[in-house]
Amino acid sequence: MTEETPMPLEGIRVIDIATVLGAPVAATMLAEFGAEVIKVEEPETGDLLRQFGQPVDGVPLQWLQEARNKKSVTLDLRSPEGQGLLKRMLETADVLVENFRPGTLEKWGLGYDLLSAINPGLVVLHITGYGRTGPYAHKGSFDRVASAFAGLTETSGFPDGPPVRQSFALADYLAASYGAFAVMTALYHRDLRGGTGQEIDLALYEGILRSSESMLTVYKKLGHVRTRQGNGNPGVVPAGQYLTRDNRHVVVHAGTDALWARLAPLLGGGALDPALKASAGRKAAGPAVDAMLAGWVAGLDAADLLARLDRAGIPAERLNTVADIAEDPHIRLRNILEWDDPRIGPVSMIDVVPKLSKTPGRVRWTGPDKGAHNAEVYGAMGLDAPEIERLKTKKVI
C-alpha cells in the first residue's frame, strides 16, 4: 500500500474529548484506519496522558503511540465559549468520544438530546467507569478498579498468596476495542441501514467481564466460585508454566488429546500410560501429569526445549521480557514500527492491529504537541488569526 492509497475510514470525523485511556485509544484505533480524529485538550495541562510514563526531552513516550494520527486542539469545555466551539465542531462530525462521569456533559449543556438536535447523525461513544445506568453510575473508575470489579484481580495469582493485578491496563484496552467496534456498528447502521446517530453506553469493566469465560454461568448453575489457580488450569491438563535447566520460564499447552499424543512419547515413562490418553484421565491425575512435564522441562535448556516442541507441533513459548520482544524476529517483522520522530528522533512502537489485506491502517504521525492543530481546525471553522489569538489569551483555547 502506498501513501496515496485511500484508507477505509477516510471521511469519518471524530471529536475526542476523552482522557486516559480506554476512550481515547478507541479514537486512536479509528484514526489508524483513516478517520480524522480531533483531540480536544485542556488548554493549560493538556491531556492527562501527557503526564504518564517516561518522557524524552519533554515528550511523553506513551503519548507518541496512543495519540498518533490525531490532530490536537486546545479547548476549555467548562467555559461557555468553549462549549459553543465544541457544538460548532460537532455540526460536521460523525462521532464524539467521551469518558466524563454521567451527567457532566448535560451539566455543560452538551447532552445527547441537544447534540443530536444539532447533528442527528452523530454517534456518541460514552466509556465511563460503571456505565450510564445502574446504582454505581455516579462512581469513577480506573483500570485497576475495573479489573477488581469484574473479578479478574481476585482470580489472579496463587492460591496461597494475595490477588495480583495484571501488568497491563487490560480493562482500558479491551474497552477501547469494544468501543471502536461499537462505533463502527453504529456507523454501519446509520450509513447502510438508513438509521440515525445514537449513543453507545460502555462501562470500563465490561470488556473484562465479557472476557471472563463462563465463570458467571458456572457459578449460577453449579455454585462453583472460581478462585486463584496460579499457573495451572484444572480443566486443561497439561497446560502451565515450567522452569528450564537454564532458568527460563516457558509455557507449554498440551491439554488436548491430540497434543498429548504428541507430547507423551517425548516424556516417555509414565506418560505412555493408556489411562492418560483421554482428557478425563489426565484431569484425574493432574498433579502427577504436571510433575512429569515439569521434570522433563527442567532437564533441557529453553532453546532446545522449544525446538523439540515446535517439531512436535506442540504450542509452547518462553515468557518474554520486553527485551526479548524487541529482538524477536517474528514480532519485529509483524508488529514493530520504527519511526523517526522530529522531536526525539528514532522511536519504536507497536504497529497497527489488525492487518487488513486491501485497506490496512497506517501511522501517519505520532502524538502531536498540545494545540498543534489549533490554526488548522479553528481556521477551517471560520475563525481568523485575531479571533484565535483572542480565545487563546482568554484561555478558552
Image (cartoon, rainbow, N blue to C red):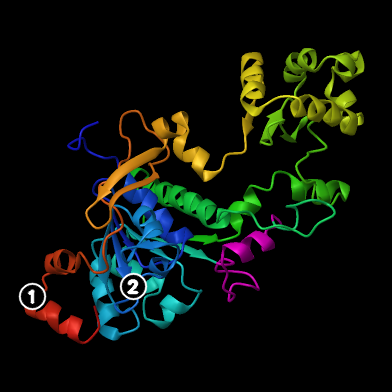
Within-10-Å neighbours for mark 1: few <14, some 14–19, many 20+: few
Within-10-Å neighbours for mark 2: few <14, some 14–19, many 20+: some
Q: Name the residue tied to disc 2.
A: 46
Quadrant of residue 142 in the image?
A: bottom right
- Residue 328 lies left or right of residue 305; in this view the side is left
Name which residue type carries label 1: Ala
In the displayed structure, 18 sits above or below 184; it is below
- Residue 354 has which mark? none
Measuring 14% from the left and 68% from the top, which residue is drawn there? 375
x and y, in percent, of residue 274 in the image:
90, 13
Which of 274/112 is in front? Answer: 274
In the displayed structure, 56 sits above or below 304; it is below
x and y, in percent, of residue 305 in the image:
67, 23
What secondary structure is the magenta-colored segment mainly? loop
What's the magenta region? 129-152
Quadrant of residue 137 in the image?
A: bottom right
Residue 271 visible in the snapshot:
yes
x and y, in percent, of residue 156 in the image:
73, 52
Q: CA distance from mark 2 to mark 1?
A: 22 Å
Question: For the view shown, which residue lies furthest in the bottom direction?
Answer: 394
Q: Name the residue tied to disc 1.
A: 385
Q: Is residue 147 magenta?
A: yes
